[in-house]
Amino acid sequence: MIDISDGLSTDLSHICEESGVGAELLANAIPRATFRERAVDLGFALHGGEAYELLFTAGARTRVPAMIDGVKITVIGEITRETNIRLLESDGSSETLEPQGWEYFRGLPGRKRPPRLVSSSTALRLPESV
């Protein structure tokens, strides 16, 4: 479990990197805030920070409740054996999703960029074999 205050793409990449796995995200399942009665851009939902929501994984056989303590839970994808993150569109197309959220040590002199690394309403399914 991780908070996504640095952006979903970046914080998901931290989970994947530490676990040696990848993920497939369903673009149409990503929760998006509304502003002036319109959903925010998907890019902002993926890379914007300060969401103060939690991302967690659950086993394939685990029943993920629709709500926990009044907070809506949304399944947004699955963990994969591949070590990249893919964004799956509803038309069947997909693209590699690079982390573009906040990284604390990016650009500091003498330091390499950290290696590439779902809201209290976001969950990813784990396949049984991972």
Image (tube, rainbow, N blue to C red):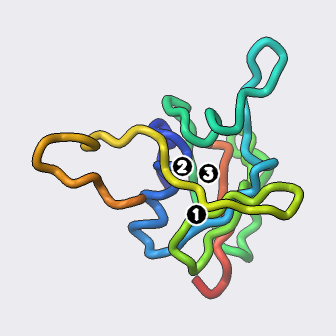
Q: Position of residue 116 (x, y in %)?
A: 40, 59
Q: Amino acid at mark 2?
A: Ser
Q: CA distance from mark 3 to mark 1?
A: 12 Å
Q: Position of residue 110 (x, y in %)?
A: 10, 48
**Vertical comparison of 36 with 96: above or below:** above
Q: What residue lies at 80% left-to-right and 55% top-to-bottom? A: 89
Please tell me whether mark 3 or mark 1 is closer to you in this view.
Answer: 1
Q: Amino acid at mark 1?
A: Ile
Q: What residue lies at 28% left-to-right and 43% top-to-bottom? A: 106
Nearer to me, 104 or 128: 104
Pointer 1: what residue?
A: 85
Residue situated furthest left in the rendering = 110
Pointer 2: what residue?
A: 9
Pointer 3: what residue?
A: 118
Nearer to me, 58 or 13: 13
Q: What residue lies at 57% left-to-right and 38% top-to-bottom? A: 53
Q: Secondary structure at mark 3?
A: loop
Q: What residue lies at 82% left-to-right and 21% top-to-bottom? A: 38
- Can residue 61 be seen at all in this image of the molecule? yes
Q: Amino acid at mark 3?
A: Val
Q: Are marks 1 and 2 in contact (CB under 8 Å)?
A: yes
Q: Secondary structure at mark 1?
A: strand
Please tell me whether mark 2 or mark 3 is closer to you in this view.
Answer: 2
Q: CA distance from mark 1 to mark 2?
A: 9 Å
Residue 63 in the figure: left or right of residue 99: right
- Can residue 70 be seen at all in this image of the molecule? no
Residue 111 in the figure: left or right of residue 39: left
Mark earlier in primary sequence (2, 3): 2
Mark earlier in primary sequence (3, 1): 1
Where the C terminus falls, by quadrant? Answer: bottom right
